[in-house]
Image (cartoon, grey):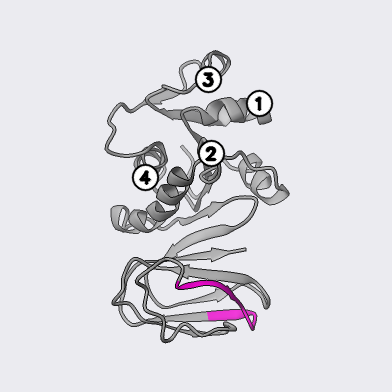
Amino acid sequence: MFTGGNIAILCNGEFPRGEYPLYLLDSADFIVCCDGAASKLLEHNPALVEKAVVIGDMDSIDSDAAAAFERKFVRVGEQDDNDQTKAMCYIMEHYPDAASITILGATGLREDHTIGNISLLMEYTRMFPSCKAEIQMVSDYSTIFAVTDTIELHIGEGRRVSILSPDNSLKIKSEGLVWPTDDVIFDNWWKATLNRSSSDVVKLSFSHPSLALVILN
């Protein structure tokens, strides 16, 4: 078991094609495949199987992947959590000192899975309050992460930024955005989307600790 490494969770959505998400997958110290995503990893790069496990109820894995991964299965039959969350729980139990956790393949193909997987980023801040790892979801189109309080984001001028929150009592004062969020009422997910950074650093000041998502394109 390593400490301080970079872990990738590969979900069974749209497999990444972009240079950056593929780099994060290929360079990960350890990979947790969500069920059928094992087949996609095997097709992408069979050499990565050596540093990967498969988690889930194994209801969507094909025979080639089953043979390639052999005994590298973590069977979790309960249906209260989806496979992405099962992968997070596995990492928190076995690799609590991981430096980063990058979730790939979590979007695309099905909108319901996409919305659920993205919203779970906020839930993980509640489920794993002691987690020190940087948790992000990366696709060919965006990087998404949860924030829980005032933060400065060093993202560069001109970056497309969206902010979402399920807390309609939350006020977020912003500095460094083209359209300030100070008066936004977060009673629907679209309310602070499609913004853009006007400086290299964006500061978001929360009225109280809460949950929000930042999506960078």
Q: Tags 1 and 4 in contact by the CB under 8 Å rule?
A: no
Q: Name the amino acid type tagged 3.
A: Phe
Q: Residue at x 28, y 77 (%)?
A: 169
Kindly identify which residue carries mark 3. Answer: 69
Kindly identify which residue carries mark 4. Answer: 92
Please determine whether, in this image, residue 41 is positioned above or below residue 168.
Answer: above
Kindly identify which residue carries mark 1. Answer: 43
Q: Residue at x 51, y 44 (%)?
A: 106
Residue 13's tag is: 2
Q: CA distance from mark 2 to mark 1?
A: 15 Å
Q: Name the amino acid type tagged 4.
A: Met
Q: Residue at x 43, y 48 (%)?
A: 117
In this view of the protein, can residue 45 be seen by the observer? no
Give the mark nearest the N terminus, 3 or 2.
2
Foreground tag (2 vs 4): 2
Q: In the orientation shown, which residue stands out farthest toward the right?
A: 19
Foreground tag (3 vs 1): 1
> Residue 200 location in percent, x, y?
64, 80
Q: Residue at x 51, y 81 (%)?
A: 203
Q: Quadrant of residue 133?
A: bottom left
In this view of the protein, can residue 120 be seen by the observer? yes
Q: CA distance from mark 4 to mark 3?
A: 22 Å
- Please, what secondary structure does the residue beneath circle 3 have? helix
Q: Residues within 10 Å of mark 3 (few under 14, many from 20)?
A: some
Segment colored magenta: 191-202
